[in-house]
Amino acid sequence: QVQLVGSGGGSVQAGGTLRLSCSAFGYSYSSYCLGWFRQAPGKEREGGATIDSDGSTSYADTVRGRFTISRDDAKNTMYLQMSSLKPEDTAMYYCAAYLGPRVTDCYTFPQPYNFWGQGTQVTVSS
């Protein structure tokens, strides 16, 4: 059974940093697209960052330059390092894995991702 477990959220002041982690159980990360998505209250889930099996990354404009996604396939874990956090980054953050036909570039929107972590809350105060 595939399971993703996210952790590392919390409350910080604007300008602070947090690192989110997501561990996978039941399958190997190594061959698939991985991503971090977020959802604020009353809003749709939106893309944040993705990383493919070769380590190529993509970022939403709202987080580019402040967030860094990475993966450690030996540990079946991926990370999201977040810096220069802003109040508008406040959201539930979800890790996700795409297990499907191989694609050239990882999807930057959430719909194709078929396995999800439980979500970890990030709250940034001004």
Image (spheres, rainbow, N blue to C red):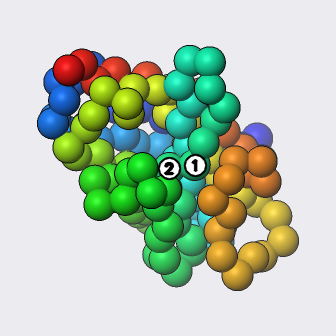
Q: Are marks 1 and 2 in contact (CB under 8 Å)?
A: yes
Image position of 43 (left or right of 15):
right
Residue shown at 62%/26% (left/top)? 43
Q: Do we see residue 43 in this rendering?
A: yes
Quadrant of image for the C terminus? top left
Residue 58 position, x and y percent, is 49, 67
Q: Residue furthest right?
A: 101
The 10 Å Cα crowd at callout 1, few under 14, some 14 to 19, many 20 or more, is many
Q: Residue 32: percent from the left, percent from the top?
A: 65, 66
Q: Nearer the viewer, residue 56 or 88?
A: 88
Toward which corner of the image does residue 19 lie, by quadrant? top left
Check residue 48 in the rendering and tell me which mark sits there, or answer none: 2
Asked whether 66 or 95 is in front, the reply is: 66
Q: Is residue 24 visible?
A: no
How far from the left and from the top, in percent, is residue 90? 39, 26
SS at mark 1? Answer: strand
Asked if 83 appears above or below 6 in the picture, the reply is: below
What's the residue type where badge 2 is placed? Gly
Determine whether the residue tagged by mark 2 lies in a helix, strand or loop. strand
Crowd rating for badge 2 (residues with CA inside 10 Å; few <14, some 14–19, many 20+): many
Which residue appears at 57% of the width and 49% of the height?
A: 47
* Frontmost residue, 25 versus 34: 34
Q: Is residue 30 left or right of residue 116?
A: left
Residue at 76% across / 41% down in the picture?
1
Instruction: Please give the name of the residue rendered at 43% of the width and 23% of the height, measured from the top-left corner.
Output: 121
Report the residue marked by disc 1. 47
- Answer with the quarter of the image where residue 45 lies: top right
Tell me if residue 99 comes above or below residue 48 in the rendering: below
Q: Which residue type carries mark 1?
A: Gly
- Image spot of residue 7 (x, y percent): 41, 32
* In-image side of 40 versus 108 (left or right): left
